[in-house]
Image (cartoon, rainbow, N blue to C red):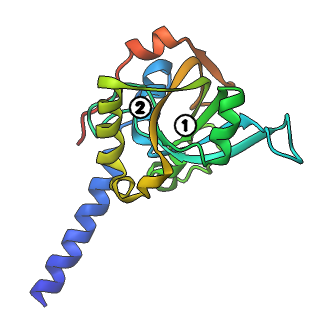
Amino acid sequence: CQPALLLLFGLAWAAVSSACSLQIPPHQEVARVARFVAHQCDWASMATISTHKPVVGQPFSNVFSVSDGPRGSSTGVPYLYLTDMEVSVQDLQVNPQASLTMSLAQTDYCKQQGFDPQSPLCAHIILSGSVIQVNGTEADFAKKALFSRHPEMMEWPKDHDWFFAKFNISQVWVLDYFGGIKTVSPEEYFQAAPRRKQN
């Protein structure tokens, strides 16, 4: 009986800890909210302009694993692990412009709060910009950032010629409250810091 009670207590404590773990910044601090969402999310939907028939020239959205740094070490820069074999990467070779969407719906936050993924209260961001390959010390950091949060990547086929890239942000769009979408400049975005403190 005692082990069962301890197990139940542990599960209850884990649930409470999980609910308290995401301390989203106040919605008035728009740039900080954007940085917070970018650091919490492990994947994003990236839209490119398709180069593939029969949808040439049309928006084409795809899912990518991302990381802006190891947990607790946010940079605000979404890094990606890519291969030329991937259909969206082939689009980027023709036109590197893209948009990247990340939402707290992919965490437990919105579900615990009872927010629908489309609700403005379920914070999400849209980044406009371009995707560029990184090398040298930045590639080393991208590797650490991605592999620490997506360890399976280390086992992906070596013959796919993987490379590290980053999303070069030109504009940030934030929807985290009622009243419409808000914009944040890259300068404001990178000057802000996500909240790391946990209860």
Residue nearer the viewer, 119 or 154:
154
Q: Quadrant of residue 84?
A: top right
Numbered disc 1: secondary structure: loop
Q: Is residue 79 visible?
A: no
The mark tally for this picture is: 2
Extreme-front residue of the structure? 159
Q: Quadrant of residue 192?
A: top left
Is residue 195 left or right of 37 when viewed as pictured?
left
Q: Which residue is found at the position 24% from the left and 34% from the top?
A: 197
19 is higher (above) or lower (below) than 22: below
Q: Is residue 125 visible?
A: yes
Kindly indicate whether the residue at mark 1 contacts the one at mark 2 (C-beta within 8 angstroms): yes
Percent across and percent down for residue 193 are: 34, 21
Extreme-bottom residue of the structure? 1
Q: Which residue is found at the position 56% from the left and 42% from the top?
A: 122
**Residue of label 1:** 123
Q: Which residue is found at the position 66% from the left and 32% from the top?
A: 92
Q: CA distance from mark 2 to mark 1?
A: 10 Å
Q: Of discs 2 and 1, which sits in the foreground? A: 2
Percent across and percent down for residue 114 are: 54, 54
Is residue 98 left or right of 108 when viewed as pictured?
right
Is residue 165 left or right of 12 when viewed as pictured?
right
Percent across and percent down for residue 113 are: 49, 50
**Residue of label 2:** 36
Q: Say which quadrant the N terminus sits in.
A: bottom left
Percent across and percent down for residue 134 are: 43, 26
Q: Say which quadrant the C terminus sits in.
A: top left
Q: Amino acid at mark 2?
A: Phe
- Label 2, residues with CA under 10 Å away: few <14, some 14-19, many ≥20: many
Reading the chain from its start, which is encountered first: label 2 or label 1?
Answer: 2
Q: Amino acid at mark 1?
A: Ala
